[in-house]
Structures are given as structure tokens and as C-alpha cells.
Image: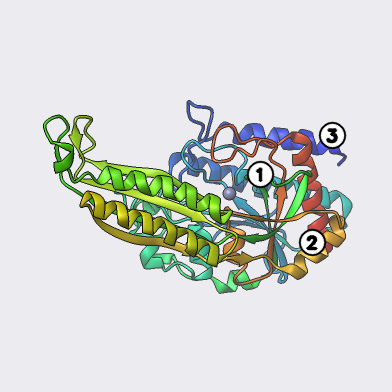
Amino acid sequence: MDQEEIGKAFSEMWSQLSLIGGDPTGGYHRFAFSAADTHLRSWFRSEAERRGLTFEVDCNTNMWAWTDPAAVRVVGTGSHLDSVPGGGAFDGPLGVVSAFLALDLLGQRMEGLPPVAVVAFTEEEGGRFGVACLGSKLATGDLSPETARSLRDGEGVELARAAAQAGFDPSSFRPDPERLDRLGCFIELHCEQGRALRQPVGLASAVWPHGRWRYTFNGEANHAGTTRLADRRDPMLAAAALMTSARIGAQTAGAVATVGRIAAHPNATNGIADRVDVWLDARAPDEAGLDALVDSVDRVVYAACREHEVDLRQTRESYLSEVRFDAALNRRLQGVLGEATPVIPTAAGHDAAVLAGHLPATMLFVRNPTGASHTPHEHVDIDDCIAGVEALAEAIEALA
Ligand SMILES: [Zn+2]
């Protein structure tokens, strides 16, 4: 296949996928165990089967396509097909489509396909049930089956029920070391999610440590007109202090901090809230920096709570230490892809980072010209998509 043929094959697969799970804003809403998910799964299965790959769904609902169902020291590749609400087209599917096309390319170059497994992990975004990388964490044992089954979506539907309704058996969830042991290494191709990559393709060095904290501020509900300022216990003011201090703390630490979610109760225009929940997402180049950032936010928040007589309950909902991708694998791939191939860290989580705790893993990033991600504006140029497919094929050929 020359570049034009890869581009044509890519566009054909992409246009089929683009019909699934679109929303009116031009983005995608592809939640685990939804109707869109069922369509995505049958798309994956038919792509696997038309290439003569062995398709299977593992005990944790992840999908696999093996070139040889009995092989060991297999090169694992792939990504995820789910999206955040209103997500872009490339985050996830780019890695799955590129994996299938890399196999097509290798099929022409080599006598028989090397041992490769293409995987699509379930609920990578945590968009529906709130826990990111759910399918890969179940497989590695980083998430307990009981915890996973009892997660609830925004409508209160339990994950176990949603999975069963989609035709899966949630009682089969369990760590799956036998399957993972068959992988000699794992390479996830993914669109870069910032503007850190100036070349078509790069490698990932590490994932920044990151965490999510929930702050619940309790004050006193009252009338927005008749309550004197001096008499108020307004939790929104403490929430506001949190948001501005997070921004200042992140700037100081060379980190990022975001409040993207807030819930006020009773959420009335003409009333002082009695309760405000705020979620802080913070990520930094190292753990000391992340801890210092959150400490600086807390100091400001405690002071605001005292000033406004607001009670605070703070919970750390998740914390992920820094993940370093396999340095030896990266060196080998730089040898294959060119010594000038950049190796860059990312502040976003990935299934490859979950697997990296258990087997040699790394990522291939494909350039994102605008840096937009998790929005309908997410975009990767077709020439860079082609470069990604070629790089992945070269990587697999070298490692298989
Ligand atoms: Zn992703």
C-alpha cells in the first residue's frame, strides 16, 4: 500500500465510524453499553473478521482481534472506542483504525502476519460511570470487579445492570493475567491532546501524576434579597476561592488545574445555596509539585470557609502516581522511527499507562494541530494519520 492507498482505506473506515454515536453539535456521545457502543462493537467485529483475525470479547467486555489465537509474545496495539460526552472523533478510534490499517500494510510487506492483537478497551474515558480506563484496570486487577459492578451512571443505573442489558455477564469480571501475559509489549497509538508535538509522530515518555478532589461546602440557604451580607453563610464564595486559587497554584507550579464540574443546591437564581460541590482536577510534572499545588489551594479554601462560616468536607476521589513508559521500548522504537522522533510526556491518562504497570508499554502520539481534544473540534490531518499508520506498522514489524 502506498500513502495514497492508506489514505483511501483510512477515509473509508473513518466515514463508516463517523455514522455511529454522533450528536447534534458535531461531536460524539459514545458511552459504554449504550446503543452507540453496540454499533461500535459490531463495527470492530466486522473489521476483525474481514481480515481473518480471531475476534473475542474477554471477561471484562474488552474486545480483541488476534492474528494468531495461540501465539505468545504478541505485540498488543489498539485503544478505545468510547468518548466523553460531546467528544471528538479521534480520541480513541484513531488508535483502533490505525491498528487495523497497520496490519493491512504488514500483510502486504510480510509473508504472513506477525503475532499481533488489536484491542478496544471498554469505558476508557469514564464518561458514563466515572472511572477512567475501566476495562484495562479490570484486566490488570487495578480495579476490583465488585467496585466496577456497583458504579452508577448519571441516571443512577448500575454498571452491572447496564452491562447485562447490553448482553454481557458482569459476574465474569475478574483480573485477566493469562491474556495479558500473552502480550510481549503494548503500543497504543493516540492523537496528541495538546500542542506539544510539532512533528507528525512522537513517542510518550510518561503520564503526569494526577488526581481528582471533591470539595463539599455546606452553608445556609436563604433569601437572595432579604438576607443581609453580614448574615450570610454562602458556600458559593468558598467555591469561588477554590477556583481562582487553583488557577494561581497551577501557574506557580507549572501544572494544570481545572474546575469543570460544580453542583449547587438548590441551584436557585434568587437563593443563597446551602450546599455546593466542586470537583478539582489537578495534574503536574511530578508528585511533589502536585501535592504543593493542592496544599496551596487548600490553604486558601480553609481561609475562605472560616471567613464565610462554611463547613467543608474534602475527599480525594482518585490519585494516580506518575507513570513512566518503557524506556528500553522507546529507545528501540526511536531506532526504528528515527532518532529525531520526539519523546514527550502527557497530562492525559490512557489504557497504555494502566498496562505499563504490568508489561512493557508505550504510546505513539500523532500530531494534533490545534491542540483541541474532548471537543467536536478535535482534529488530525489525514497526512499525519497516514504517517501514524506507517509508524505503527514499522514498530510492530520491528518488535514482532
Ligand atoms: Zn483516549
The residue at which mark 1 appears reads as 94
As drawn, is 257 to the left or to the right of 227? right
Identify residue for label 2: 114
Q: Which is nearer the N-term, disc 2 or disc 1?
A: 1
Instruction: Say which amino acid is labelled 1.
Output: Leu
- Residue 211 in the image: x percent, y percent? 47, 59
Q: Where is residue 374 in the image (x, y as percent from the top left)?
A: 54, 40
Q: Say which of marks 2 and 3 sits in front.
A: 3
Which type of secondary structure does the marked residue at label 3 adopt? helix
Comparing 275 with 91, the one in front is: 275
**Which is more foreground, mark 1 or mark 3?**
1
- Say which amino acid is labelled 2: Pro
In the image as oriented, which residue stretches furthest toward the top? 24
Q: Is residue 191 left or right of residue 108?
A: left
**Whether residue 125 can be seen here:** no
Image position, residue 276 (x, y; %): 27, 46
